[in-house]
Each structure stands twice: as structure tokens, then as C-alpha cells.
């Protein structure tokens, strides 16, 4: 087979071993999975996830795989989709910098569904997970930021390749079969930015997990695809990108790892809002002023901040997760920024909505996405300003392991799953030494 870019990437996946993965990347894989189960346990009782699970159960192909935080047992394709949706529904999942792709949900959901149908060791699953994240993030880097700017939801469109690569590794696909898996995935890559703020966004993420799993399973059965599914004239990169940078995929394979650029959210909202919320929480701490005293709020940040979050006319909690107007109002007013502050009830609070129209954006391309300035101008003429150069949860201020453990406990309580968090946390940190990775799913379900 000709050494195409697609084949080069496939060959890397085929040959990679656990000993090739640096210790810090191994640890980051564990951290990513702790965060994955945390956000999935929060989303398990979301009304839209419940609706989807109820509908899926009507077409269930057999009970093989568990749903995180729930009692249903589904066929592995359905379980992969639903668990990825649950992880993504609150926009609380991890974020790769600078692509803003949420890498874990599509890959982990597919892998754990497969791990309940055959015995897979923790080391096998972790290696496949690292490789799946590597594939989706490198593909995303090759077409970012133009891809997202054109309206494609990058987690859904690129996540399907990560899931296919990860599952293909566990299935023992050779390079030719992995290229087929990429071709099968390319035929199913979809997802639109227009869906952000609605439940439909999570369908794309669920499909990335399901269809990536399906792509690899088909390839194992000899279901063939094109020789250049990624770089071909009408392949994924050229159709979904503008001027794809192929070196982002090929250069530094096995030397530079995408998980090293992964981050975790302290707040359930779009990642560009992290510095804004932190600045507002600090401004509102021990405040001696009333919300009614505010004349305007000036929000300075990278233009991406306005492009992604200028949403004053929201009506639902789901929409509030990508609304700077709501994030600023609720964090200033309540001094909190958890899931309850981004709910339907919070959005209906007229006291908060009165602040929405007082927000003004100031675009400054010199600001990194993890930075922001919030400036409050009062009717009295006085001004309060908070500059945040590095926000909590960014690459330069990462969340600690302890923070992620507490996040799992808190979100498990919020989702009311009834699962015991501590055994799950312990098992996640010890996953590398487990002989049965699928056992984690039984700890995370009812």
C-alpha cells in the first residue's frame, strides 16, 4: 500500500505500544477519564439524555453495555452514543488547546462500550485512548481555526476519527484496516456550530462515538474505504478545511502528544468564558455595591469570546452555557458558577436578565483565549476592573487531581445517580493495572 498520510497515521497507531507513552501523558489519560466520568454522572439525569435513552431503548439491539449513572443496559453502539451525549450535554467536558475540541467523550464512550463486550485490560484501553485523542486532535489542528469558523462543530467532525482509531487499536487492526476505518469515519463526520446551546449539539458528539466504533468494527470485517480518506482531493481535510496543514498530522508523531495540551473546566460553560467568570467571581467577592448600581460592564478579550458567546436573547439553561451575558450576570450576582447557575431557573431570573443589556464587548486580538478583562462602570462614575492573565483550568493553571476528584463527587451528587463515587475514583487511578477495564462501567452504573 502506498505510504499516504492516512497510511502513515494508521501505521503509527498499529505500531504504538504502552511503553512508548511518556509517564506524564499516561497520568493525563487517567485525569481525562476522571473528568469524563464526572461530567457523565452529571448529565445522566438531564431531561434530554433521559428522552434519548427512552427512545433508544425502543431500538435496543441487546443488553451488553451499561449507561453511566443509569440502570439501562444497551447494545454497545447505543451505549457509546448515549454516554458521549451525557458527557457533553452540560458543556463541562475537557478541552484541547487551541482547537477547542472536547477530546475525551467520543473516544472514551466508544472504548468503554467495547470493553463491556470483550475483556480489555486497563493498559490496552488507556493506550487506545491516548492514540484516539492524538488522532482527532492532530486532524483538528490541520484544519483549525478555519473549520470551526465555517460552522463545523469540531468535536463531532473530528471526534469520529479518534473513536475509530482507538477502537481499531483495541481490535488489532493493521494499518490497511485502520485506513479503511478512517474512510468509514469520514463518511459519517458531521456536526454544526449552529446547534450549540441546544440538545442537538450532543447528538453530533454521540454520533462521533457511535460511528467511530462502527467504522472500526466494519473495517475489521473487511469493509473497505479509500486509500486517502484524510488528504485525498475530496477527502476530509480538503472538503472540511480551507488550506489544511498536513504537517500537523505527520510531524512529531510519538514525540508531541495532544493530551499534554488538554484542559479541564472549573465551570460548566464554553471554555472561553472561564477567565470571564473567574474575574467576575473575584470582583463580586465581599461586594458593597448592588447590581442596580451598575451602568455598564465592559468585557475585553480575544475576538473569539464575542463570536462564541454574544448571546443576550437566551431562554434556556442550555443556551446560558455559551452566553457571556448570563455568565457575567450570574457570577456577579450569586458569587457562584455551578450547574445550578446555568439552569432554566437561573435564566428566568429577571434580576439577572436586567444585566444582560449592560454588557459591552471589546475585541482585542492580543488577548489569549484564556485571558480577559472585566470592567464595571457604576452610575456614580466609579470603576472596578479585574484583569485575568491566566484562568483556572488553563494549561498554565491546571486543575489539580484533587480538584478533579471533588468535581466527580459534586457532579455525581448533582446528577443524583446513586453511584458510590469513591470506589469509582479509586478504580480510575488504578486502571492501568486492571485486567478488566469494562468493570469501571459497572461501578459507574446502577
Image (cartoon, grey):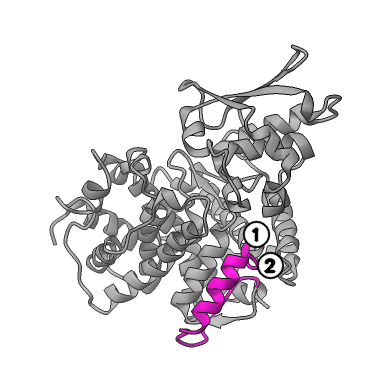
Q: Secondary structure at mark 2?
A: helix
Say which quadrant the N terminus sits in.
bottom left
| Place of residue 359 in the rendered image (x, y in percent of width and height, measured from the top left) | 62, 28
Residue drawn at point x = 74 percent, y = 34 percent: 332
User: Could you tell whether 193 is left or right of 353 in the image?
Assistant: left
Residue furthest to the top: 381
| Place of residue 234 in the rendered image (x, y in percent of width and height, measured from the top left) | 17, 53
Q: Residues within 10 Å of mark 1 (few under 14, many from 20)?
A: many
Nearer to us in this view, 12 or 381: 381
Task: Using the rendered view, name the quadrant where residue 145 is placed.
Answer: top left
Residue 59 is one of the magenta-drawn residues: yes
Residue drawn at point x = 62 percent, y = 58 percent: 39
Task: Using the rendered view, name the quadrant where residue 289 is placed.
Answer: top right
Q: Which residues are magenta?
A: 42-69
Residue drawn at point x = 14 percent, y = 50 percent: 233
With respect to residue 392, does 40 lie above or below?
Answer: below
| Place of residue 78 in the rendered image (x, y in percent of width and height, measured from the top left) | 47, 76
With respect to residue 57, does 83 lie above or below?
Answer: above
Residue with the mark numbered 2? 424
Q: Secondary structure at mark 1?
A: helix
Q: Earlier in the sequence, mark 2 or mark 1?
A: 1
Residue with the mark numbered 1? 38
Q: Mark yes or no: residue 437 visible.
A: no
Q: Mark yes or no: residue 367 visible.
A: yes
| Place of residue 121 in the rendered image (x, y in percent of width and height, measured from the top left) | 52, 72
**Distance from the alpha carbon under mark 2 to that under mark 1:** 10 Å
Amino acid at each position: 500500500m502506498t505510504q499516504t498520510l492516512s497510511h502513515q497515521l494508521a501505521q503509527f497507531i498499529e505500531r504504538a505500544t504502552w511503553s512508548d507513552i511518556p509517564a506524564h501523558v499516561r497520568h493525563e489519560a487517567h485525569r481525562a477519564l476522571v473528568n469524563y466520568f464526572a461530567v457523565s454522572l452529571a448529565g445522566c439525569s438531564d431531561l434530554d439524555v433521559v428522552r434519548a435513552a427512552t427512545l433508544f431503548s425502543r431500538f435496543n439491539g441487546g443488553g451488553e453495555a451499561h449507561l453511566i449513572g443509569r440502570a439501562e443496559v444497551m447494545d454497545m453502539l447505543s451505549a457509546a452514543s448515549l454516554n458521549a451525549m451525557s458527557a457533553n450535554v452540560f458543556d463541562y467536558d475537557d478541552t484541547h488547546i487551541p482547537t477547542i475540541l472536547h477530546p475525551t467523550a467520543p473516544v472514551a464512550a466508544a472504548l468503554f462500550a467495547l470493553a463491556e463486550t470483550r475483556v480489555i485490560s486497563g493498559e490496552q484501553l488507556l493506550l487506545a485512548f491516548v492514540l484516539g485523542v492524538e488522532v482527532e486532535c492532530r486532524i483538528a489542528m490541520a484544519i483549525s481555526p478555519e473549520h470551526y469558523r465555517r460552522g463545523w462543530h469540531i468535536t463531532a467532525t473530528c471526534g469520529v476519527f479518534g473513536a475509530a482509531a482507538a477502537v481499531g487499536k483495541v481490535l488489532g487492526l493493521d494499518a490497511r484496516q485502520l485506513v479503511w476505518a478512517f474512510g468509514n469515519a469520514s463518511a459519517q463526520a458531521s456536526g454544526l456550530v449552529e446547534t450549540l446551546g441546544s440538545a442537538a449539539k450532543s447528538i453530533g458528539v454521540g454520533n462521533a462515538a457511535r460511528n467511530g466504533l462502527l467504522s472500526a468494527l466494519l473495517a475489521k470485517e473487511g469493509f473497505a474505504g479509500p486509500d486517502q480518506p484524510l488528504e485525498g482531493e475530496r477527502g476530509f481535510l480538503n472538503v472540511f478545511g480551507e488550506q489544511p496543514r498536513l504537517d500537523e498530522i505527520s510531524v512529531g508523531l510519538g514525540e508531541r502528544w495532544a493530551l499534554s495540551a488538554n484542559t479541564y473546566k472549573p465551570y460548566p460553560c464554553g471554555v472561553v468564558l472561564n477567565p470571564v467568570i473567574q474575574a467576575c467571581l473575584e470582583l463580586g467577592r465581599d461586594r458593597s455595591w448592588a447590581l442596580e448600581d451598575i451602568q455598564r460592564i465592559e468585557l475585553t478579550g480575544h475576538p473569539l469570546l464575542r463570536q462564541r458567546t454574544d448571546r443576550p436573547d437566551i431562554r434556556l439553561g442550555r443556551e446560558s452555557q455559551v452566553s457571556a451575558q448570563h455568565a457575567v450576570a450570574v457570577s456577579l450576582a450569586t458569587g457562584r458558577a455551578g450547574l445550578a447557575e446555568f439552569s432554566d431557573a437561573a435564566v428566568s431570573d429577571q434580576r439577572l436578565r436586567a444585566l444582560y443589556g449592560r454588557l459591552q464587548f471589546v475585541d482585542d486580538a492580543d488577548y489569549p483565549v484564556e485571558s480577559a478583562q472585566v470592567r464595571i462602570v457604576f452610575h456614580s462614575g466609579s470603576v472596578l476592573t479585574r484583569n485575568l492573565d491566566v484562568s483556572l483550568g488553563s494549561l498554565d493553571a491546571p486543575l489539580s487531581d484533587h480538584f478533579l476528584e471533588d468535581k466527580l463527587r459534586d457532579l455525581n451528587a448533582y446528577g443524583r445517580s446513586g453511584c458510590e463515587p469513591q470506589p469509582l475514583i479509586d478504580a480510575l487511578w488504578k486502571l492501568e493495572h486492571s485486567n478488566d477495564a469494562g468493570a469501571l462501567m459497572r461501578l459507574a452504573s446502577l
